[in-house]
Amino acid sequence: MGLLVTLLAGLFFASPARAEPLPGAPDPDAPRAWSFWQSDGTAWLTAPEAAAETTPADGATVGWRFAASPDQVAAEAPGGDIPVFEQLCKDVPAAEGEKRVVVAVDFGDAEADAYPGETPPSDTPVVRCVSAGEPATALQLLASMTKAGVDATGRVATVQGYPARAAGDDVREAAAPVATEEAGGLPLPLIAGGAALLILLAITILLLTRRRSTV
């Protein structure tokens, strides 16, 4: 009898067990992250460098995928068909000094990857052909396509504000590439220098004219 009372007391006063997620529901505590990928035209490959340090060439294809990442590694590549550069960029002109790059954004699976209570902005990958200056990095190309937030290490934390749980004081908006000058136009520094030279020349002529008039 005493043993039975002890067992019942232990069950009654025991700390409640951690509630497990429902079958098929995302674990609220599972790590999630945006991962950066590059495509060779036939498959998605894990990018060897960070997006802020990668400068894609004209004709390249880059992508991001949000997914549950237990080991904080690139767990899932962007879904859907591999983007075809020739199809997506055939109607996008590139001015002199610019490049065209295909950018894909996959917000992940709403059931397996999303934080509980959050809904991805799109249930299918968003793919576009982006035109920018040749020095533009992959991160800048993403920022020119949509709003992207990066954390203190420069890694993408949010895209279009998703996931909201990742947004915080340490997340800042990534900057888009600086617009290039029109093809055939003069660079802005050269224009500014020429204007300054003309002003200096005008002042010199004015001083010489005044000096002659006083002689």
Image (tube, rainbow, N blue to C red):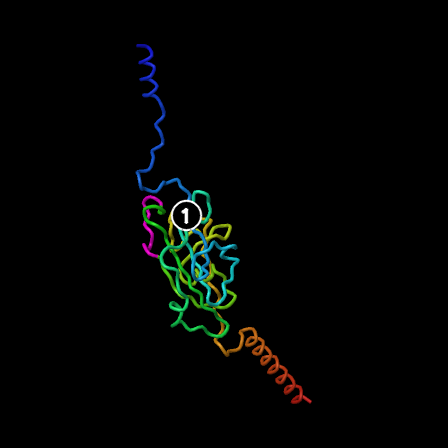
Q: Tell me the quadrant of the picture where the C terminus can be found.
A: bottom right
Q: Is residue 120 magenta?
A: yes
Residue drawn 34% across the image and 50% down it: 109
Residue sitting nearer the eye, 113 or 167: 113
Q: Is residue 215 above or below residue 166?
A: below
The residue at which mark 1 appears reads as: 166
Task: Tell me where the magenta segment starts and ends, as one range.
Answer: 115-124
Residue drawn 63% across the image and 87% down it: 209
Residue sitting nearer the eye, 189 or 174: 174
Determine whether, in the image, residue 54 is placed left or right of residue 64: right
Could you tell me how many numbered marks the image carries? Answer: 1
Q: Is residue 79 above or below residue 128?
A: above
Q: Secondary structure at mark 1?
A: helix
Residue drawn 34% across the image and 46% down it: 112
User: Residue 5: x, y in percent?
Assistant: 31, 13
Q: Tell me the quadrant of the picture where the N terminus can be found.
A: top left
- Identified by mark 1, the residue type is Ala
